Image (tube, rainbow, N blue to C red):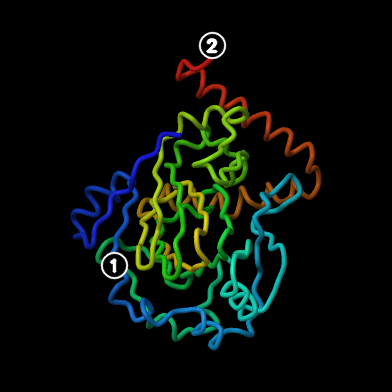
Amino acid sequence: MQLQAIDKVDTITSADFKEKYYNIKKPLIITGLAKDWPGFKKWNWDYFIDLLGNIEVGVYDNVKSDSYTPINTADGYMKFGDYLKRIKEGPLELRIFLFNIFQHAPELVKDFSFPEYLIKGFVKKYPMLFVGGQGSITHMHFDIDMSHIFHTQFIGKKRVLLFPYEEQYKLYRKPWEVLSMANYTNYYENFDYNNFPAARLAKGYEVILDHGDTLFMPAGFWHHMEYIESGFAMSLRAMQSDLSGKLDGAWKLFGMRGIDTLMKKTVPKWWYNRKKQEVYHLAKKELLQAGIIQ
């Protein structure tokens, strides 16, 4: 993998943001965006345990999905407060994602603001919380709705690996899914290039997010995240401004996902093997084009 650092700024004007990042779909870290939010200092483990400890949430382990697994199927359920208490005790390879905590505690929307001075189109009904214990992993994927994301880290540190959407075949994307067939866990020490050689060609970014960092992820960006420390983050989503981008997100969300889920339920092994064959065929084309193989 050919990785570079992500640009980092404290603040940025709307004009500079659009010209240097938004228009060309380049990620950015904004360190000062969230520092004036009340939630920046207010939100912590004990605050959420007291406020929403009795809410039942789905939790996800580190096992990658297989040919039988529909997208976003929880591996278990537990009380939010019990989960957070276990995180406080030490490493826990369980995470929560796409948790709309604001449906249960709408007053929390007063603790942050949407950066509309940068872009418009925020989906204000769906700010989402992402929580993970130390050692938990969000496997390589892109967001199915193809929205732009402002992902703010509150507690803990998290390692993030990013790639533009166009790198999908080098990353071994499974057709009809948002996931990669390759496992990027501990990619910086031991990635399986023997079975996934085209990944050497993939050009992307890496960063370690810390408390208060806001990562701008352009629409469709692939991302893999590893929780170095237990922590949580919030994502604010903004729809793409052009009609084609909106339609692409709608198709993937309501069309592609439905077809894939149906096939996994009816002919899972055949469906998986068919997709695997196509994955390696497309990766081979990338290797041929780069002159790696003949």
Task: Tell me where residue 93 appears, x and y as whole percent.
Answer: 63, 61
- Residue at the spot of label 1: 33
SS at mark 1 in the image: loop
**Residue placed at 65% from the left, 55% from the top?**
62
Kind of residue at disc 2: Gln
Marking on residue 168: none
Q: Nearer the viewer, residue 152 or 98?
A: 152
Q: Residue most toward the front? A: 90
**Residue placed at 59% from the left, 31% from the top?**
196
Q: Classify 245 as above or below 281.
A: below
Task: Tell me where residue 84 appears, x and y as whole percent.
Answer: 58, 76
Q: Residue most toward the bottom? A: 50
Marking on residue 294: 2
Neighbor class of circle 2 (other Cα within 10 Å; few <14, some 14-19, many 20+) is few
Residue 121, picture quadrant: bottom left
Residue 127 in the figure: left or right of residue 197:
left
SS at mark 2 in the image: loop
Marked residue nearer the N-terminal end (1 or 2): 1
Q: Nearer the viewer, residue 247 or 230?
A: 230
Q: Give the tally of numbered discs.
A: 2
> Label 1, label 2: how many angstroms apart (C-alpha)?
49 Å
Task: Tell me where residue 187 appears, x and y as whole percent.
Answer: 53, 42
Q: Nearer the viewer, residue 109 or 76?
A: 76
Neighbor class of circle 1 (other Cα within 10 Å; few <14, some 14-19, many 20+) is many
Q: Classify 231 as above or below 29.
A: below
Kind of residue at disc 1: Leu
